[in-house]
Image (cartoon, helix red, strand yellow):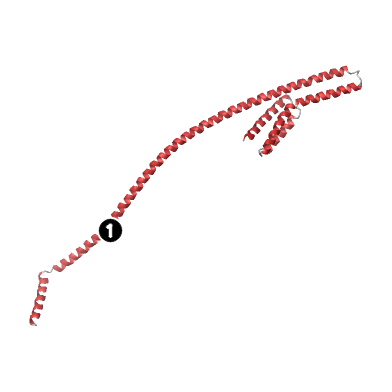
């Protein structure tokens, strides 16, 4: 028992002596623990930084891929724009040429229509002159007949008057033949356009005006002008029919 007590005393003394002779051991242990803790913390931070770097690397790869895709798309769009620009230039040139062609064709057709109208009007005007000449001949003959028939019985004189009236009516009918011809053509156009619902109130008014004017007594100059207007109106109706 005494030996055990002695051993405990010796161990305690030894331990006490170690602390007495080495007072910095506890501080070193605390420092080691602190350093180990800092080391663990640095490892954790290092792992976090590594993860962040990995994310940044992945993001950078995605950005590069996106940039490459955008560059490729930009090249494709540039090529497409260049092709469209060339097509637009070609189309603009074609449209310009087509417009010039249509303008030239329209001018030629307008000129031809004007010439045709002028020729037809002149032809009708000549017909009127011939009709007027024919009308003047029977009038002279009738005057001579009256002078010669002064002593003829009343029955023959009445017969001569009837013949004169018939000739005058025939001459008047021949005079209005050209007017009736253009009016008949306009009436036919009216029927055709009514079927296609292209005949307007304005067209109806113009036709009625032409009827009134051409069926009235006019001078040759006024008659020619009215015929030209009627022929131009007929051309407009023909364009409507062609649509």
Residue 142's spot in the image, x, y percent? Answer: 83, 20
x, y percent for residue 95: 51, 33
Q: Position of residue 64 (x, y in %)?
A: 33, 47
Quarter holding residue 31? bottom left
**Residue at figure coordinates x 75%, y 25% from the top left:** 175
**104 relative to 2, above or below:** above
Task: Give the residue at the far bottom of this rendering.
Answer: 1
Image quadrant holding the N terminus, namely bottom left
Which image quadrant: the C terminus?
A: top right
Name the residue located 74 percent from the left edge and 27 percent from the top edge: 177
Element on which disc 1 rests: helix
* Residue in the picture at 43% in, 37% down: 83
Q: Nearer the viewer, residue 19 or 178?
A: 178
Residue for badge 1: 48
- Left or right: where does residue 241 sit relative to residue 217? left
**Residue at the image point whose x is 9% and y is 80% from the top:** 4
Q: Position of residue 82 (x, y in %)?
A: 42, 37
Q: Is residue 243 above or below residue 1?
A: above
Specify the quadrant of the image occupied by residue 21. Answer: bottom left
């Amino acid at each position: 028992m005494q030996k055990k007590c002695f051993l405990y005393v010796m161990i305690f003394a030894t331990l006490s002596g170690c602390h007495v002779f080495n007072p910095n051991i506890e501080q070193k242990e605390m420092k080691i623990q602190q350093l180990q803790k800092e080391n663990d913390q640095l490892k954790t931070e290092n792992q976090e930084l590594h993860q962040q770097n990995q994310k940044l690397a992945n993001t950078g790869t995605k950005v590069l891929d996106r940039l490459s895709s955008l560059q490729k798309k930009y090249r494709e769009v540039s090529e497409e724009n260049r092709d469209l620009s060339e097509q637009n230039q070609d189309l603009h040139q074609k449209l310009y040429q087509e417009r010039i062609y249509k303008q030239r064709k329209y001018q030629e057709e307008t000129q031809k229509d004007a010439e045709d109208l002028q020729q037809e009007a002149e032809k009708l005007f000549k017909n009127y002159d011939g009709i007027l000449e024919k009308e003047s001949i029977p009038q002279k003959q009738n005057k001579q007949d009256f002078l010669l028939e002064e002593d003829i019985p009343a029955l023959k004189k009445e017969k001569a008057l009837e013949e004169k009236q018939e000739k005058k009516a025939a001459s008047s009918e021949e005079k209005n033949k050209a007017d009736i011809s253009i009016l008949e053509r306009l009436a036919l156009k009216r029927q055709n356009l009514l079927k296609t619902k292209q005949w307007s109130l304005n067209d109806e008014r113009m036709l009625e005006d032409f009827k009134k004017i051409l069926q009235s007594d006019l001078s040759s100059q006024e008659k020619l002008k009215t015929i030209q207007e009627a022929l131009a109106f007929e051309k407009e109706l023909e364009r409507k029919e062609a649509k």
